Amino acid sequence: MPASLAPMSPELFADFKAGKENALEQFFRANFEAFTQEANEKLEDLGGAQKVAASAILDAWDRRAKLESVEQLGTLMHQAVNGEAAHELRRRGAAQHMAGSHAKPHEPTPPESLEQWWTKVSAVLHAPHPDAAETARKIAEQRRHDAAAHMKKVAGRKRPGVYVIVALLALVGAAVPLWYLNKGAVATKAQQLLDKQDAKSMRSNDGQRGTVTMEDSVVVRLGSATTVKYTKSYPLDARAMQIVGVAAIKAPKLDSPLLVRVGNIWVLASDAEFIGRSFAEDSSSAMLKVLSGSVTVQDELEQKPLAAGQTMLVLSNGTFMDLDEAKASLYFSWADGQFVSSNQPLRKVLTELKKWFALSIAPKDSSFLDRPVSMTAPLDSTKIAIKALEEGAAVKVTLVAAGRATLVDNAKNVKQK
């Protein structure tokens, strides 16, 4: 059953949120055993459950500045414990499946004392932030050592394909917790690099689209009126990008996930393609659609998976919401070369038409701007788009200059006829 947080006074919570280490120690000592038991109900491995509990507590500490209540802290802890435990079970299941009939039962990890675990947590707190390249090198070196040891133990079996797969699973299984514990520091460093004046960017204007392939084979499809920033020495210093506008990004499977900032969230992508949208008028909210594979959506307090075909809206305050199908069509159909509106307000449709067709349409008055509009038009034909708008919104569009037009309500004239 879910663990309950030990009683936490307002003073202790305030000290925890302020980053006082003695508050973390009190929290750790009061809650470590309970969350270990919660994880152990899923893992049936006390030592492994201790690792999950410690990781969850460090994660809460990493996100402490955004916590607003003890209840929110408890929710975050449960999410972290369950997420880490579920990942460990999936890793074990994959390893068992790949090993087939030769698979040995999982060997539980020997548990350690609370003092030993606090020493480990304290060591993580005081360790210097690792250089990304050096960390990756050390991880790879350690995993090669682990893989060699594993292959030596099973050398009598003649299934080399399985050896390679199991070794790779061991690498991934060990690397993920390290990323989980340090993702806050990695994201912070990535944002700092993106905020520098020497950060690079690719841009598109109204009515423009383009495709760029990066050094690491990441493919970026820019939507209209969009800027995609990336770090100066991408991908050497950090595989990080930021979308201001809308773009479809396809990330191949590499050693580390691609980090993409969209609004106030990060999207972690590997072997996946997704669309991210956050224009200035979206007020730091983010809209996402996964085209293939799956991604992880991360804000200051939550981490959510998103699979192919799924869409999501993340408000600027961190609230995760489903994105209804009609809005998803309006915001994401450009990736298929189409402009699609399904009963969307005319004022919103006009804003989108300006982006995708470089067509600024000024209505004669605002009395009909809330009228629902349904229309479909290819992005390569402004003429068809205007005709579809006239039919779908019962309006009359008159071009007055290149890229400019006026709009009048035609519904009254239709009724009179």
Image: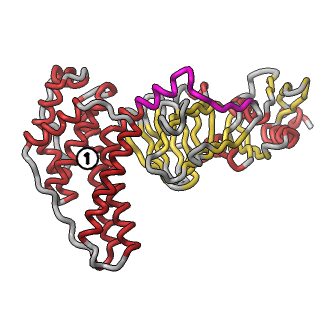
From the top left corner, tell me how far across and down residue 172 is, in percent.
36, 55
Examine the structure image and report whether residue 194 is included in the region drawn in magenta: yes
> Is 175 on the left or on the right of 115, as rendered?
right
| Vertical comparison of 369 with 59: above or below | above
Asked whether residue 370 is in view, the answer is: no
- For residue 72, what is the image quadrant? top left
| Vertical comparison of 132 with 44: above or below | above
Colour pattern of the rendering:
secondary structure
Residue at point 22% right, 38% down?
Answer: 57
Q: Nearer the viewer, residue 71 or 196?
A: 196
Residue at point 58% right, 31% down?
Answer: 229
From the top left corner, tell me how far across and down residue 187 is, in percent.
42, 33
Q: Nearer the viewer, residue 301 or 120?
A: 120
**Helix, strand or loop for disc 1:** helix
Q: Which residues are magenta?
A: 188-205
Residue type at mark 1? Val
From the top left corner, tell me how far across and down residue 348 is, in percent.
68, 32
> Is 125 on the left or on the right of 254, as rendered?
left
From the top left corner, tell me how far across and down residue 285 is, in percent.
52, 31
**Crowd tier of the residue under label 1, counting other residues whose Cα lies within 10 Å: few below 14, some 14–19, many 20 or above:** many
Asked whether residue 41 is in view, the answer is: yes
Q: Which residue is mark 1?
A: 81
